[in-house]
Image: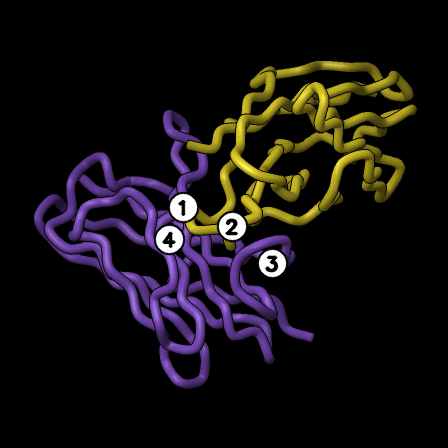
């Protein structure tokens, strides 16, 4: 059973650019969550999608957005990149959304903003 | 809001030593509690979980007991191995449906020396 796949694994952007990250969940999982991991702030919740609808959202500016497709694949977009957006972005999927459901994480997309 | 506090380390132990990583939390209601582990260059993997008070989660020799009276979920292992070297994250999911997603501690970097 394939795990959670994130692409690209590594990318470098410059300030002001935008970036799109992709996440393919485990087959059958309908919930996809995104987290940002930085050395200073640790792991912070960005948003969660379930059946193409955003269910929950963390405390991030509107430059951070996402969507989910009918096949449960998800993308997140960061516009007008800032140096502080450099981070490991982790996607996680689960069979159901929220609560005590176990999240399975991908390996992450490491974004460097120069 | 919800929060998780854990020692950040690094924690350095010799092989076969006893391990304790402390984790305390603040949450409204009755959260579910988790320990995740992150190996270098990888995403997070669920190590164990507990969904109600006095539950004990266990996996791969690791154990943690949900203590509501002390709001704690300390991770223990009787005899650590070099392969246990990783970063360990304590996390909670609130009982209200996870509006904030998972709330993570800052992570504890564990180094096991042969």
For residue B55, above or below residue B46: above
* Residue B69 location (% of width, % of height): 72, 22
User: Disc 4 to disc 2, how far (Cα)?
Assistant: 35 Å
Q: Quadrant of residue B10?
A: top right
Observer-nearest residue: B100 or A86?
A: B100
Q: Residue at x 82, y 34 (%)?
A: B54
Circle number at residue A104 = 3
Q: Crowdedness of circle 3 by 10 Å Cα count: few (<14), some, many (20+)?
A: many
Q: Which residue is mark 1?
A: A45
**Colour of chain A as rendered:** purple
Q: Quadrant of residue B74?
A: top right
In the displayed orientation, state which residue is furthest to the bottom: A70
For the residues carrying marks 3 and 2, which lies nearer the camera in this image?
Answer: 2
User: Disc 3 to disc 4, how far (Cα)?
Assistant: 20 Å
For residue B54, above or below residue B74: below
For residue B21, above or below residue B64: above
Nearer the N terminus, badge 1 or badge 3? 1
Q: Are marks 3 and 4 in contact (CB under 8 Å)?
A: no
**Colour of chain B as rendered:** yellow
User: Disc 1 to disc 2, how far (Cα)?
Assistant: 16 Å
User: Disc 3 to disc 2, how far (Cα)?
Assistant: 21 Å
Respond whether the residues carrying marks 3 and 4 are from the same subunit: yes
SS category of the residue bearing label 2: loop
Protein chain holding label 2:
B
Q: Are marks 1 and 3 in contact (CB under 8 Å)?
A: no
Image label count: 4
Q: Which residue is mark 4?
A: A10
SS category of the residue bearing label 4: strand
Horizontal side of residue A63 vs B108, given as left or right:
left
* Residue B16 location (% of width, % of height): 91, 21
């Amino acid at each position: 059973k394939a795990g959670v796949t994130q692409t690209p694994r590594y990318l470098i952007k410059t300030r002001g650019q935008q970036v799109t990250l992709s996440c393919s969940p485990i087959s059958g999982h309908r919930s996809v969550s995104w987290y940002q991991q930085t050395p200073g702030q640790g792991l912070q919740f960005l948003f969660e999608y379930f059946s193409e609808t955003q269910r929950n959202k963390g405390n991030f500016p509107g430059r951070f957005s996402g969507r989910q497709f009918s096949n449960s694949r998800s993308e997140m977009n960061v516009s007008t990149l800032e140096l502080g957006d450099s981070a490991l972005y982790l996607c996680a999927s689960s069979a159901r959304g929220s609560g005590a459901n176990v999240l399975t994480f991908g390996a992450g997309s490491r974004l460097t903003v120069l | 809001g919800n929060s998780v506090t854990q020692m950040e380390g690094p924690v350095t132990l010799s092989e076969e030593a006893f391990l304790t990583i402390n984790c305390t939390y603040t949450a409204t209601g009755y959260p579910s509690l988790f320990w995740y582990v992150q190996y270098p260059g990888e995403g997070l993997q669920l190590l164990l979980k507990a969904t109600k008070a006095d539950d004990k989660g266990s996996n791969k020799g690791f154990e943690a007991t949900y203590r509501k009276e002390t709001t704690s979920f300390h991770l223990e292992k009787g005899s650590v191995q070099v392969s246990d070297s990783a970063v360990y994250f304590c996390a909670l999911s609130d009982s209200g449906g996870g509006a904030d997603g998972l709330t993570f501690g800052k992570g504890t970097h564990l180094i096991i020396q042969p």
